[in-house]
Amino acid sequence: MDILLWISIGFIIIGFVVLTSMKKGMESKLDFITANREEEESLTKSKSIIWWIVSTTAWGIVSMILIVWWFHNHFG
């Protein structure tokens, strides 16, 4: 197997582990925001949730690009 496949698999697995480990914290932040809508701390926590969503989306896009790139190099 070539190095691009191992980089892709490693990136996907490490990213998945990191995102699932952060999921519980994001759920608790969301619970805090829904319970305390008027507090200043809710704004900070909502920004961290938005950045988590953006990061998750970016991780998914990069993962798909790596897999497509590997298929293109391997079978193309």
Image (cartoon, helix red, strand yellow):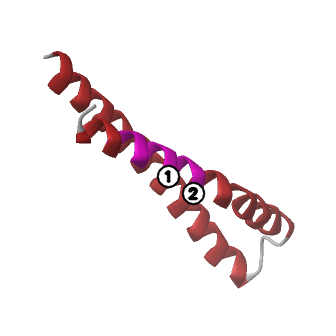
Residue behind mark 1 = 14
Furthest-top residue in view? 75
**Where is 4 relative to 42, above or below?**
above
Residue behind mark 2 = 18
Q: Secondary structure at mark 2?
A: helix
Q: How many marks?
A: 2
Q: Is 15 within the magenta? A: yes
Q: Camera-side residue: 58 or 36?
A: 58
Q: Which residues are magenta?
A: 8-18
Q: Camera-side residue: 68 or 33?
A: 68
**Where is 13 relative to 50, above or below?**
above
Indicate left or right for 28 with 69 as reference. right
Indicate left or right for 22 with 76 as reference. right
Residue 46 coordinates in the image, percent (x, y): 63, 67
Q: CA distance from mark 1 to mark 2?
A: 6 Å
Q: Quadrant of residue 21?
A: bottom right
Residue 63 coordinates in the image, percent (x, y): 38, 40
Q: Secondary structure at mark 1?
A: helix
Residue 1 coordinates in the image, percent (x, y): 28, 31
**The C terminus lies in which quarter of the figure?**
top left
Q: Camera-side residue: 2 or 26?
A: 2
Q: What's under tag 1, amino acid-wise?
A: Ile
